[in-house]
Image (spheres, rainbow, N blue to C red):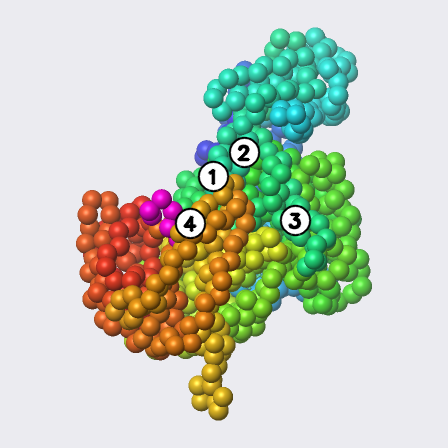
Amino acid sequence: MVELQLNENWQLCDIKKQDWVPAQVPGDIYSVLLKAGKMSDPFFGDNEYQAKALMEENYEYRTVFTYDEKQFENCQEVLLRFDGIDTIADIYLNECYLGKADNMHRVWEFPVGELLQKGENTLRVIIRSPLKFMAEAFKKYKNIGNEDTVEGFMHLRKAHYMSGWDWGACLPDGGIFRPVTLLGIKSARLDSIYIRQVHEDGKVLLIPEVDVETVDEEEIDTDGKNSVEIPDQGVESEADEDLLEYEVTVTAPDGTKIVSNGSPDEIVIENPQFWWPNGLGEQPLYQVQVDLKAGDKTVDTWCKKIGLRTLTMHIEKDEWGESFAHEVNGHQIFAMGADYIPEDNLLQRTSKERTRELLLQCKRANFNTIRVWGGGYYPEDWFFDLCDELGLMVWQDFMFACSVYELTPEFEANIRQEFIDNIKRIRHHASLALWCGNNEMEMFVKQGNWVTKPTEVRDYLLMYERIIPEVLREYDPDTFYWPASPSSGGSFDEPNDPNRGDVHYWEVWHGNKPFAEYRKYFFRYASEFGFQSFPSVKTLETVTDDPRELNPFSYVMEKHQRNYGGNGKIAKYMQAAYRYPENFSAFVYASQLLQADGIRYGVEHYRRNRGRCMGAIYWQLNDCWPVISWSSIDYYGRWKALHYYAKRFFAPVMISCEEQSWMTAEADMNRQHFQFEKSIRLNVTNETLDAHKVLVKYAVRSADAKILRQEEQWVEVPALSSSWLEKVELPEIDCFNEYVSYEAWENDQIISQGTVIFSYPKYFHYLDPKLAVRVEGDEIVVAADAYAKSVEIRNETENLVLEDNYFDMNAGERRVKILDGKPEGLQVRSVYDI
Ligand code: BMA
C-alpha cells in the first residue's frame, strides 16, 4: 500500500470573513486562531466566552497537494482517509463533493482515484458550527442530559466534555485532529487483523483472523483458510497471480522470530513470557507482523505489539453478593488507579510525549488500572501503547455519558461504524481489560433522570445491551463487556448496588458526607469516588494576572470551578479538618491535604477489605485546562498532594490503620454525652504474587515525637491478600498531645508507614517542628524537631516531582529522591503552618 500524508500547505478561514491563515493538520481550529492572533488564550480569565462564540461560525480548511502518478503506479484504488475530523464536515476534492463526516470518533474514507489529477489538487474541508447543530437538534428532540454542558450535546458524536462538564470549560473547538492520508491500494489490503490467544499446556497459540479487502470492495474473510482466491478483476496487477496469502512474523521480546507463511491458522509460542499489570510482573511485548502477499509481492502490512495474557472479569456469587474483579493470568487482582479524561481542550496540544509523562506518573504512583471515561474521545493509539508498556490495565468506556440518546436509524448506523472502527483499532492491546457501554446512564435512566419519553428507555437497552454486544461478538468476543459504569450487569437491575458490580460513590463530596462515611460501605469495585482541591498557585497564576483574583471565592477562581458552589464546599469540608488558612497559598495547601486524606480514607478501607472489594479507581487523574477539580495531577502536570498519597496508598505492600477517633465518631463536643472510642486496628495488605513477612511496629508518641509506648509484631501476609492485626484500645491517649505512628519493615527498611491522631488535624497541639530543608546530590533532606504532619516540599516553580512528599515525620530526618524539577528556592511547611 502506498501512503501519502497530506499534512502540508493547509490554511484555514472563517467562511464569512475569508481571512485565510496558515493551519496545522493534524490540529484544531482554536490552535490556528491563537497562533494567528485571532483569539486570546481561552483558559485565561473568562476568555472562554469569546472562544465559545467563535464556534457559532463555519470554518474552511484548504490545501493544495501534488499528486504524483508514478508514486501510485500499480494502485488499483486510491482512497482519501481521515483518521479523525471534529466533527461535522463537508469534503471536496477538486471541487467535487466527496461527502459528509459527522462523527469525530470515526475514520472516514472516500474513493478518489477518478478525481485526482496529475500535479496540483485542491482539498477543502468545511467544518460546520457544532453549536448551531446542537441548538437545532435540541429544538427537534428536546432530549436532556448533564446540565453542565450545552443543550443538545448528545445528538452530536463529538467528545461531550468539549461543550462543558463539571470540571471542563465550554470550548467546542473543531478541526482535523488526526492525520489525512492518500492511500494507494494494490489489488487488496488488510482490512483488520484479530489475534486471538489460546493459553494451554504452558504454551500460547496465536490465532490470526485476517480480513482482506480487495479493490472491488469485496471483503474476504481468510479465517480458517490457507489462502485466498481473489475474483478475476480483469486488471493487470499482482493480483493476476490470483493468490493472496498472508505471512505472520512473531518477534519475541528477546528478538527471536517465528515466521509462518502460507496463511497459518495458528502460531505456537513455546515458553511464553506473560504480560502483567504494574506491580505484579513484567510487561514483555511480542511484535506481530502480518504481510499480505500477492504472489511474491507484499501488498500490505499490519504490525502491532501484543502481550500474552488472559484478562477478564471474575464474577461469582459469594457471601456478600457477587464478586467483580480483574482476573489476570488466572489471578484475581485489586484494581488501583484513577479515571482518565481527555488531556486538553485543544487537541493539537496533545502528544505521545505528553501522554507518556502523564502515564509515567501513574506508574510512579503504583497504579495498575486506568479508566477511560465515556464523555471524552477514544484515545490515540499511543495511549494504549503506553499502557501496554507501563502495565496499566484499561477500562475503556464507549463514548456515551450522562444523558439519553435518540436512536434514529441514521444514529444507529453511525455509532455501529464508530464501534467497529475503534474496536478494530484497540482490541489487540495487552492493556485492554474491558469494554464498558457508557458512563452513568443505566443508573440515571433507571432513576428517571433525563428520561422524557418511554422510547429513551427502550433505546438505552438497544444501544448497550443489544447493539454493542452484537458488534463485540463479531469483532472482539475475547474482551469482557460491561454494559455501564456503574452497573450490576445490566437491565436496570440495581446498577449502583454496593454488593455487585462497580459503584460510583458520591455521598462524600456531592452528598456532603464526611470522610468517615467511606467506611460504611464495602463496595465490590469502586470505579468512581472523588474529592476536589485547588491546583498549585503557580497553575492558578496562569489564568489571571490580578493578584486580587487569587482568592478562593473570586470571579476568576469561580469561573475555573465548574461544579456549582464547589469552592464553598471545599471551604466547608476544610472547616471540619483544618484551622482557618491565613493566606491563599495556605488555603491551596489545606485543600490538597483535605482531598488527599479523603481519598486515602476510602482507598485504605477498600484495600483492607481486599477480597470483598477488588477495585479503587478514584475520580479523577488529570485535567484538560487549569481548573479547580477532582484531579490528582493538574493541567500542567503538577502533582497535587493526592498523587503522593496515591503512591503510598497504592503501594504493593501497604500498612494502614483503621482508627476509631473523634473524627470517625463525628462527636459534638458541646453535647451532653460527648465521648468517643480511641483505638487502632492495623492491617497489612499485599497486592503482589509473593508472600511477605513484615515487622509491624507502632508507637504512642507525644507531640515532640518521643516514644511513650512501643509494640512490634511479625506479620505474614500471603500473596494477594490482606491481614489484620488485633485491635488495640487506647483509652488513655491524650488526643490533643499524643499520636500513634505505625510502620511496616522488611529487610531492615520501612516499606510503608503512617501516623494517626485521635481528634482532628486542626485541634492537635503541634509543637513547632522547625522544619529545615537541604539538598544533597539528587536528594532532598528534611529535618524536623517534632511531629510534623503532611510535610510539603516546594520549589519556586512548584513543579518538583519527588520520591515522596506530603508525608508525616516523627522528628529527625527524612531523605527523598528528586525525580523531576530543580530543587531551587525550596520551601517546606506542615499542618503546623495552617
Ligand atoms: C461522575 C463522572 C463525571 C463527573 C464526576 C464528578 O459522575 O462520571 O461525569 O465529572 O462524577 O461529578
**Marks 2, 1: nearer the viewer:** 2
Is residue 548 visible to us here? no
- Kindly identify the amino acid type of the residue bearing the numbered disc 1: Leu
Q: Main secondary structure of the magenta part?
A: strand
Return the x and y of residue 623 as percentages of the image width and height: 46, 55
- SS at mark 1 in the image: helix
Residue at image location 52% in from the left, 29% down from the top: 285
Q: Determine which of the numbered discs, if any, sits on residue 694 in the image.
A: 4
- SS at mark 4 in the image: strand
Magenta residues span 744-749
Mark 1 crowd level (few <14, some 14–19, many ≥20, 10 Å Cα): many
| Sequence order check, earlier mark of 4 and 3 | 3
- Kindly identify the amino acid type of the residue bearing the numbered disc 3: Cys
Residue at image location 49% in from the left, 24% down from the top: 253
Give the total number of marks visible in the rendering: 4
- The span from disc 4 to disc 1 (Cα, nearest Å) is 27 Å
Is residue 813 visible to us here? yes
| Sequence order check, earlier mark of 2 and 4 | 2
- The span from disc 3 to disc 1 (Cα, nearest Å) is 22 Å
Label 1: which residue? 390
Label 2: which residue? 275
Q: Residue furthest bottom?
A: 672
**Marks 3, 1: nearer the viewer:** 1
Return the x and y of residue 91 as percentages of the image width and height: 61, 39
Label 3: which residue? 436
